[in-house]
Image (cartoon, grey):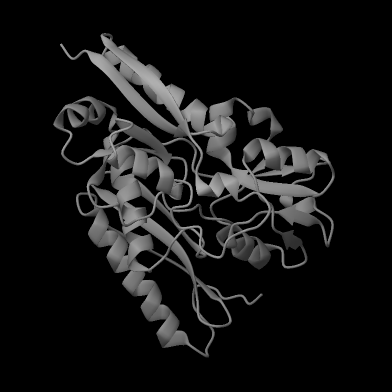
Amino acid sequence: MISGTVIVGTRKSLLAKRQTERVILDLKKIFSQLKFLTKEIETSGDRQKNFIPSDLKGVFVKEIEEALIAGKIDFAVHSLKDLPVDITPGLEIAAICKRCDPRDVLISRNGSKLDKLKKGSQIGTSSPRRKLQLLFYRPDLNVIDIRGNLDTRLRKLKERKYDAIIVAAAGLVRLGWQELITQYISFDIMLPAPGQGALGIQIRKKDKRMKDIIKKLNHETSSLEVSAERAFLKAMGGGCRMPIAALAKIKGSKIKLEGVAATGKNLTLIRSFLEQKKRLPEMLGRHLAEKITGIFYKQKGKKVDSYRTKI
């Protein structure tokens, strides 16, 4: 029987703490003799409230990973879309929990859905991925940056600084705020960030005891799908500030991966997909990246067969 005390690292945001609490509750059901303590850690991304850095890669996990390496915490719970694809040496993702809804959602101040928003409406998002896909669908909208945790963004919407905002469905679902959602945005309009809606549990690579504990929470389907998406992101050379989107879905013995990437000086936006055996998710991600890159260079200066837009 596994017993003792486990220290869990988390960001200070309301959503991050709620996600960590959920993981701890699931572990307690399996390991009733374990005691869990939560250590809140402020990250550089949380401190940067008044500007948007040009490179957000790892800013929401850096200090947490440092605490993990130093042995101050035993594991950390991350939103996988915030975790860089190049894992810090000495650390590993020991489990990917069952994925929540990966869609993006619209929350509008007057209840208008995306098709009914007035021309020139101000839409808040700091994601280049969301901005590019949104402007392809509605080029008449005015997309402006918004910063802060989910509760901060909702407050800014309420203060009439925006007509609507776009955020991930998963955060609202985990906080029990689904009633705020005006519209779940179709994947036909907007693919999510790689790993969106999934939680990754990070440990020290050599910590066998913790690996034995955490692996009980791994969800095979979610793990395979997210692995394909993150492999695509890595092969495209992307971080969380690059306009790259991906969604994988397992169907029987195969896995289908659909991706969007913006390339070139004028931001050509290309969308395509591939399907392969589900046991090879990383290979699928690399192959889709090669296909999309090939489409871009083949069609450079011509009309792209997937789609193209400039902003």
> Which residue is located at x 49 percent, y 38 percent?
101
Residue nearest the viewer, comparing 109 with 70: 70
> Which residue is located at x 50 percent, y 28 percent?
17
User: For the image shown, how many numbered marks are present on the structure?
Assistant: 0
Q: Is residue 241 visible in the rendered structure shown here?
A: yes
Q: Is residue 274 visible in the rendered structure shown here?
A: no
Residue nearest the viewer, comparing 91 with 143: 91
Figure quadrant of residue 142: bottom right
- Residue 172 image offset from top left, x and y in percent: 60, 33
Name, please, the residue furthest toward the bottom: 301
- Residue 293 image offset from top left, x and y in percent: 38, 77
Residue 230 versus residue 206 in the image, above or below: below
Quarter the C terminus occupies: bottom right
> Which residue is located at x 54 percent, y 73 percent?
307
- Residue 60 image offset from top left, x and y in percent: 48, 47
Quarter the N terminus occupies: top left
- Residue 48 image offset from top left, x and y in percent: 60, 51
Residue nearest the viewer, comparing 93 with 303: 93
> Which residue is located at x 26 percent, y 14 percent?
31
Figure quadrant of residue 105: top right
